[in-house]
C-alpha cells in the first residue's frame, strides 16, 4: 500500500498532464466538427440562391424570342392574304361568268345609281317665286261660300269647321302631272295658316305636286274667329289633273 502511494506521488503530474492533453484534444475535435457543419450549410445556401436567380433570366430570354417571332408571323399572314386576293382576282378574270356582257351590266347598274343620286341631289325650286292665281271671297255672302273650288277638271276642297276662305291660291296650273295631295293645316284665330304638313301620298306623276300643294296651303287665308281653337286644325286636298 505504501508502495502505491509512493507511485501515485511520483506520477501524479504525468497523470494530470495526460488528462489535460486528452481533454484539449476532445475539445478540438468537437470544434472542428462544428466548423465543418457550418461550412456545409453555407455552401448549400449559396447553391440555392444561384438557382433562384437563374430562373428569371431564362424566362426573359424566352419572352424576347417570342417577341422576335411575332412580327414574322404577322408578315407571313399578310403575305398569304395578299396572295389569296390576287388569286381570286385572277380566277375571276378567267371565269366565263365574268365576261364582257356581265361587265357591261355592272357598268349600266353603276350608271343608273349615279343618275338616281344626281336626280335626288337636285334642289327643289323655290316655290315662293311662283305666283299662283287666287280665288277671293271679298263681297260674297259667307253663307254662299263653298269649301270646294273647281278649276277646270281639277278641284280644291278644304275642311275647317265654321271657317271659310278669304284667299285661296290655286296651284293646279303649275302642275304637269296628276295626283291627289292632302295637306294638314293649323290656322290661327286671325285666319292665317301657321303650320302645314303634307300627308303621305302615292300614285303621283309629278314629284313637285307635294311642294305645290304645301306652298298653296301656307298662303291660304281664312276668316277670323276669336272663339276658335288656337290653332284650329283642318285639311286642304288638292286634286291635280295632268296638263
Image: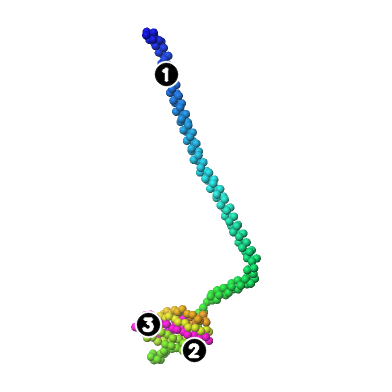
State the scheme by which the image is colored.
rainbow
Magenta highlight on residue 230: yes
Mark in front: 1 vs 3: 1
Toward the top, the furthest residue is 2
Identify the magenta region. 214-243
Q: Name the residue under label 2.
A: 153
Query: Residue sitting at 51 percent across and 42 percent down?
Result: 55
Query: Residue sitting at 41 percent across and 15 percent down?
Result: 15
Q: Mark 3 points at which residue?
A: 189
Query: Residue sitting at 50 percent across and 86 percent down?
Result: 241
Q: Can residue 84 be seen in this view?
A: yes
Q: Element type at marker 2?
A: loop
Marks 2 and 3 sit apart, C-alpha to C-alpha, by: 32 Å
The quarter of the picture where residue 168 lies is bottom left
Q: Which of marks 1 and 3 is nearer the N terminus?
A: 1
Q: Which of marks 2 and 1 is nearer the N terminus?
A: 1
**Dot 3, crowdedness within 10 Å: few (<14), some or many (≥20)?**
some
- Image: 82 above or below 202: above
Marks 1 and 3 sit apart, C-alpha to C-alpha, by: 138 Å
Left or right: 62 as drawn, with respect to 187: right
Q: Element type at marker 3?
A: loop
Q: Do the residues labelled 2 and 1 touch (CB within 8 Å)?
A: no
Q: Element type at marker 1?
A: helix
Q: Mark 1 points at which residue?
A: 20
Identify the disc placed on residue 72.
none
Amino acid at each position: 500500500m505504501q508502495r502505491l502511494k509512493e507511485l501515485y506521488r511520483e506520477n501524479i503530474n504525468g497523470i494530470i498532464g495526460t488528462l489535460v492533453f486528452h481533454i484539449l484534444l476532445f475539445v478540438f475535435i468537437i470544434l472542428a466538427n462544428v466548423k465543418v457543419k457550418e461550412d456545409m450549410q453555407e455552401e448549400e445556401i449559396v447553391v440555392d440562391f444561384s438557382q433562384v436567380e437563374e430562373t428569371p433570366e431564362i424566362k426573359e430570354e424566352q419572352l424576347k424570342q417570342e417577341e422576335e417571332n411575332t412580327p414574322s408571323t404577322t408578315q407571313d399572314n399578310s403575305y398569304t392574304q395578299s396572295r389569296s386576293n390576287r388569286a381570286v382576282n385572277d380566277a375571276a378574270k378567267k371565269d366565263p361568268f365574268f365576261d364582257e356582257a356581265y361587265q357591261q351590266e355592272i357598268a349600266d347598274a353603276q350608271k343608273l345609281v349615279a343618275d338616281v343620286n344626281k336626280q335626288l341631289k337636285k334642289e327643289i325650286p323655290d316655290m315662293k317665286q311662283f305666283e299662283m292665281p287666287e280665288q277671293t271671297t271679298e263681297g260674297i255672302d259667307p253663307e254662299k261660300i263653298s269649301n270646294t273650288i273647281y278649276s277646270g277638271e281639277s278641284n280644291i276642297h278644304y275642311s275647317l269647321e265654321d271657317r271659310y276662305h278669304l284667299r285661296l291660291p290655286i296651284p293646279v296650273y303649275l302642275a304637269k302631272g296628276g295626283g291627289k295631295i292632302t295637306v294638314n293645316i293649323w290656322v290661327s284665330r286671325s285666319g292665317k295658316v301657321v303650320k302645314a304638313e303634307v300627308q303621305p301620298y302615292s300614285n303621283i306623276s309629278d314629284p313637285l305636286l307635294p311642294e305645290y300643294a304645301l306652298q298653296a296651303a301656307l298662303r291660304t287665308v281664312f276668316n277670323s274667329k276669336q272663339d276658335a281653337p288656337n290653332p284650329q286644325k283642318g285639311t286642304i286636298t288638292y286634286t291635280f289633273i295632268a296638263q
